[in-house]
Amino acid sequence: MRKTAVAAAGVVLVVLVVWAVVDATLGGPSAEDVLDAINGQNSFCWRAELAYNIMEREIFACVNYNNGSAFWRVTSGNGTSLIRAFPGEEFYDLTWDVALNGKGVEWNALNFASWVLKEGTVEGIEKVGRNEYEIRVVLRGRESYAVGTIENGSRVEERYEIVTFLRVNGEGELKGGRFTWRSERNYIDWNRREVEEIRGSFEMLGPWNN
């Protein structure tokens, strides 16, 4: 009788462990849910921290698609600078294009999340809190471009890998994230190779009511 009770208790324990694992990995929002939530936002602010080897930067920024405006406040070891994109101001077309199309988290956090979700591979989703999930996405790619002047330029072949953890709620709304961006650049005409690693994190702060 005692052996039967122990065996039954063991079965119950196994079931509970399996249920906990399943509950922690399934049932969360999909990548499509997150993309739909991103596409539904017209005004937002975020804060980001980036570390490039020995250099660190903090960014506080907002974008409003409705009135075509944006700003970025960047703080580093060199002090604080402010970049603005407001209609009618000098260089507006250039800065607003960065707000619309920039893929780096420092320029547009929603663009960054959308980019890695669309072009990367979702490797898993884990429940990390009450109504909170973390989606692991890996994006690998290659690019070819040129740098320098006509007289002293070089072709560049770049390979990169971005490992990202996006934090979302049960409805797919993006709350923040963290990532590691590793890149290797081969400057063909300069016979030079460069390796860079960027570690970053960001936090969504809600709408920008300007």
Image (cartoon, rainbow, N blue to C red):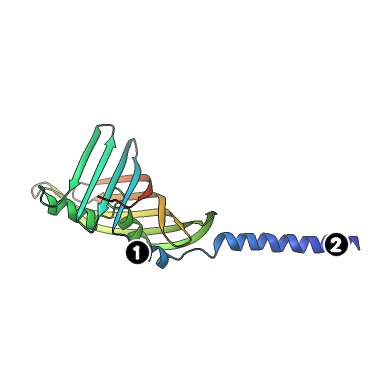
Q: Residue at x 34, y 45 (%)?
A: 47
Q: Residue furthest bottom?
A: 32
Where does label 1 land, which residue?
119
**Front residue of this view, candidates 106 and 179:** 106
Q: Residue at x 54, y 57 (%)?
A: 127
What residue sits 33% from the left and 37% below the top? 56
- What amino acid type is highlighted by mark number 1? Glu
Q: Position of residue 203 (x, y in %)?
A: 38, 48
Q: Secondary structure at mark 1?
A: helix
Looking at the picture, tell me which residue is in the foreground, 151 or 124.
124
Q: Which residue is mark 2?
A: 5
State the image coordinates of residue 59 (x, y, percent, origin top left): 30, 42
**Front label number (2 vs 1):** 2
Quadrant in which residue 83 is drawn: top left
Query: In the drawing, what numbered circle is on residue 85?
Result: none
Among the 4 quarters of the image, the one containing residue 34: bottom left
Q: Earlier in the sequence, mark 2 or mark 1?
A: 2
Residue depicted at x 90% and y 60%: 2
Q: CA distance from mark 2 to mark 1?
A: 52 Å
Q: Is residue 2 left or right of residue 145?
A: right
| 22 relative to 178, above or below | below
Q: Element type at marker 2?
A: helix
